[in-house]
Image (cartoon, rainbow, N blue to C red):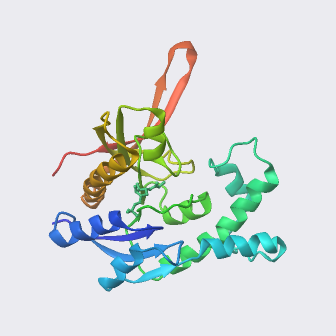
Amino acid sequence: MVKRLRVGVLISGGGTNLQAILDACESGRLTAEVVFVGSDTPQAAGLERARRRGIPTFVVDYRAVTAAFRENPGAAALPADFRLEEIRAKQGLMGNTVDPARVDGFLVSRAMAEAALLAAMREIPYDLIALAGFMRTLTPYFIDRVNSDRASLRLMNIHPALLPAFPGTDGYGDTWRYGCKVAGCTVHFVDYGEDTGPIIGQRAFPIREEDTLETIRRRGLEQEWELYPECIQLFAEGRLRTERMVHELPGGRRFERSVVRIAPAA
Ligand code: GAR
């Protein structure tokens, strides 16, 4: 008997992936329940989907937090457990050519918003956090506090491209503009980089001559609505294991990467 997984969902927009997760919970395809829905945007339409079902919601208005920081950086009230040097060393979101003061400003303002998210999340116990169209990059400050047990990752994301191609905010758009003949979506665990974490599942579909960005987005979302609940169910069944792989390449080079192994169904 698989115990019901407690899933917290973070969204920024319409929440059709959230809806797919809610529907899968209701139909029994997913042995889980959504215990809260959080957002960085007060107007996120997806919040209403949660409210209609009586699921607790909260908002951390990122725009307001970062605007307040820009206006008066000196007044930033940092969380007591925030260590800038440690977060700076870990982060893989901004390259090392970026002005260090800008990197620090970004990390500090994000930590303020992330501390507020974590405070809201602490109110309700969860086993997994699913990012479902949450359009903010998360820093190591947040990621480490969700993955409190380093050995078991519990922060998942869905991305609208076949990673590692086209990370960022417009996966389907980037795929289409590049002239790809195949598009897709990816569910992965979140690590310190931008959409770089261990891959759990992917779906691909052909791009036809008559396709437009609109049709690709629509078909992509339809794939996402199936893929995300499937991946969460694998997590609920305890079938996901992350393994560090080291490959020796020609020329004495090495390639190291954490990959997800999926155990067979019991
Ligand atoms: C989805 O296509 C999801 O893959 C994407 O945002 C959309 C949200 O739709 N996520 C990202 O781009 C994350 N970088 P939804 O709000 O209807 O679920």
Q: Percent from the top left, x then y, of residue 14?
A: 40, 68
- Left or right of 208 on screen, residue 259: right
Judged from this view, the residue extending furthest toward the top is: 251
Measured along the vertical axis of the image, is residue 246 above or below residue 227?
above
Q: Residue at x 68, y 57 (%)?
A: 87
Could you say which is closer to the camera, residue 66 or residue 25? Answer: 66
Q: Percent from the top left, x then y, of residue 157?
A: 42, 56
Does residue 165 show up? no
Could you say which is closer to the camera, residue 236 or residue 99? Answer: 99
Q: Percent from the top left, x then y, of residue 19?
A: 30, 69
Name which quarter of the figure residue 151 lies in.
bottom left
The mark tally for this picture is: 0
Measured along the vertical axis of the image, is residue 77 above or below residue 210?
below
Q: Locate the N terminus by quadrant.
A: bottom left
Judged from this view, the residue extending furthest toward the right is: 74
- Left or right of 121 on screen, residue 140: right
Measured along the vertical axis of the image, is residue 5 above or below residue 35?
above
Q: Percent from the top left, x then y, of residue 17?
A: 34, 63
Could you say which is closer to the camera, residue 176 or residue 246? Answer: 176
Judged from this view, the residue extending furthest toward the front is: 210
Q: Residue at x 62, y 47 (%)?
A: 92
Judged from this view, the residue extending furthest toward the bottom is: 54
Name which quarter of the figure residue 210 lies in.
top left
- Left or right of 181 on screen, residue 76: right
Q: Residue at x 84, y 73 (%)?
A: 74
User: Which quarter of the rendered image does ligand 1 occupy?
Assistant: bottom left
Q: Residue at x 43, y 39 (%)?
A: 176
Does residue 52 show up? yes
